[in-house]
């Protein structure tokens, strides 16, 4: 790529970054950072640990977002200078370096642009994710455990805290289900496009005849509730059961009845948590998951009512949405966006950004139709 092409592409990226800044409004973010910094400096901040955690997390997220925009803007300006110097010095190596920097900037700015499409009611929340083994027996349970690792690795790659609340282990291998939370800005809006049925095709490692097996796992993504959501759950509407944690664990696991299962009697919803050592802590965590599911239930009912008024037959994007094929060829393909890659191993190791970005763009386009 020659200097004129690199400069023209950099100018286009600058316009994209302008539009991102118009949506993100970094100046407003800086004012909020200044206000939160004053709160963090207050000597009584940690008198209320929950509020302190919320304030410090929000401050860190805002600072990271502002710094990221400033860094990208600075790199774009440096790129133009690098191209000009390369032309003056007739330096082919520096021009090639500029081409590589342009490619890196394009990827990062396009990824950031996707964030501006997250404007749903709960998109900025943390996320609860539940993975369940579906059809396919032991292969489905193993597939569910592969998906759990995939999402935890994705969170780890981005530096997002993730906490597993509950894991139900299958008898032979894998898991029946698992619920975990990802704590990050726009975690729900980002990961909600992962909701649906995932399909795995491979030679089953559990079949002594080496036959090909198709198995399925379901992914549910919910926004973490906040105080303003007004999810009222009377004590009379729930049944709380305690039991001994199951599966692998360290000290205090499998030795006390600390795990908690909550049944919401009016709806039949059941949630459980066995991650914490304390029964009380597990009950608090389980109640958070129950509140999230009731919030999502109410939202789905409102959407169904609106679809009925519009005469819409329903939205099917949350059903079967991605295939992971390991045999007879290697491919992972999103059935909604047509985005595909030929390296399933990288995807299962958390390389999901391409699928997530394509899903967010696809969803926004579907909403406009």
Image: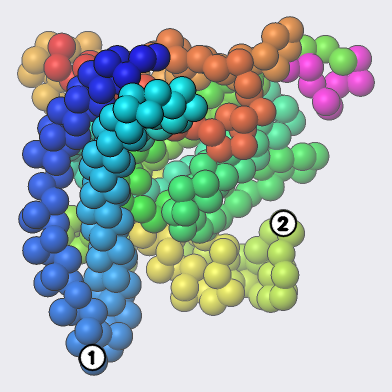
Which residue is located at x 38 percent, y 38 percent?
191
Which residue is located at x 53 percent, y 24 percent?
198
Magenta stretch: includes residue 15: no
Magenta stretch: includes residue 203: yes
Quadrant housing residue 63: bottom left
Residue furthest out toward the bottom: 43
Quadrant housing residue 111: top left
Badge 1 element: loop
Q: Nearer the viewer, residue 288 or 234?
A: 288
Q: Earlier in the sequence, mark 1 or mark 2?
A: 1
Q: Nearer the viewer, residue 290 or 68?
A: 68
Of tags 1 and 2, the one toward the viewer is 1
Measure the C-alpha gap from mark 1 to mark 2: 41 Å
Residue 258 visible to the viewer: yes
Q: Which mark is residue 44?
A: 1
Residue 292 visible to the viewer: no
Which residue is located at x 25 percent, y 65 percent?
59
Residue furthest out toward the right: 208
| Image quadrant in which the N terminus is located | top left
Q: Which mark is residue 247?
A: 2
| Image quadrant in which the C terminus is located | top left
Query: Residue 62: x, y in percent?
Result: 24, 58
Quick one: label 2, few (<14), some, or many (20+) residues within 10 Å?
Answer: few
Segment colored magenta:
202-209
Query: Residue 341: x, y in percent?
Result: 55, 17
Q: Are marks 1 and 2 in contact (CB under 8 Å)?
A: no
Query: Residue 295: x, y in percent?
Result: 25, 47
Query: Residue 88: x, y in percent?
Result: 32, 27
């Amino acid at each position: 790529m020659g200097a004129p092409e690199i400069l023209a592409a950099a100018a286009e990226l600058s316009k994209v970054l302008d539009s991102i800044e118009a949506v993100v409004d970094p100046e407003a973010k800086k004012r909020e950072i200044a206000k939160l910094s004053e709160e963090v400096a207050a000597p009584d901040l940690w008198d209320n640990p929950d509020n302190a955690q919320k304030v410090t997390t929000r401050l860190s997220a805002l600072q990271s977002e502002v710094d990221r925009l400033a860094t990208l803007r600075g790199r774009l300006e440096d790129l133009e200078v690098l191209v000009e110097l390369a032309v003056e010095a007739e330096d082919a190596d520096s021009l090639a370096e500029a081409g590589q920097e342009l490619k890196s900037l394009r990827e990062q700015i396009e990824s950031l642009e996707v964030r501006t499409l997250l404007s749903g009611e709960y998109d900025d929340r943390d996320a609860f994710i539940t993975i369940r083994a579906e059809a396919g027996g032991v292969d489905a349970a193993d597939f569910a455990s592969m998906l759990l690792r995939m999402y935890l690795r994705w969170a780890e790659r981005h530096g997002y805290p993730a906490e597993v609340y509950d894991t139900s282990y299958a008898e032979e291998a894998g898991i029946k289900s698992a619920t975990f939370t990802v704590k990050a800005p726009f975690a729900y809006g980002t990961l909600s496009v992962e909701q649906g049925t995932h399909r795995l095709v491979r030679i089953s490692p559990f079949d002594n005849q080496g036959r090909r097996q198709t198995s399925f796992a379901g992914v549910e993504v919910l926004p973490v509730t906040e105080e303003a959501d007004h999810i009222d759950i009377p004590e009379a509407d729930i049944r709380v059961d305690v039991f001994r944690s199951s599966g692998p664990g360290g000290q205090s696991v499998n030795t006390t009845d600390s795990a908690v299962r909550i049944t919401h009697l009016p709806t039949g919803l059941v949630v459980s948590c066995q991650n914490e050592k304390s029964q009380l802590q597990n009950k608090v965590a389980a109640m958070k998951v129950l509140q999230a599911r009731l919030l999502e239930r109410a939202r789905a009912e409102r959407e169904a009512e609106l679809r009925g008024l519009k005469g819409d037959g329903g939205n099917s994007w949350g059903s079967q949405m991605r295939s992971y094929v390991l045999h007879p060829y290697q491919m992972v393909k999103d059935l909604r966006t047509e985005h595909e890659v030929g390296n399933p191993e990288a995807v299962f190791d958390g390389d999901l950004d391409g699928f997530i970005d394509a899903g967010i763009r696809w969803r926004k386009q579907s909403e406009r139709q």
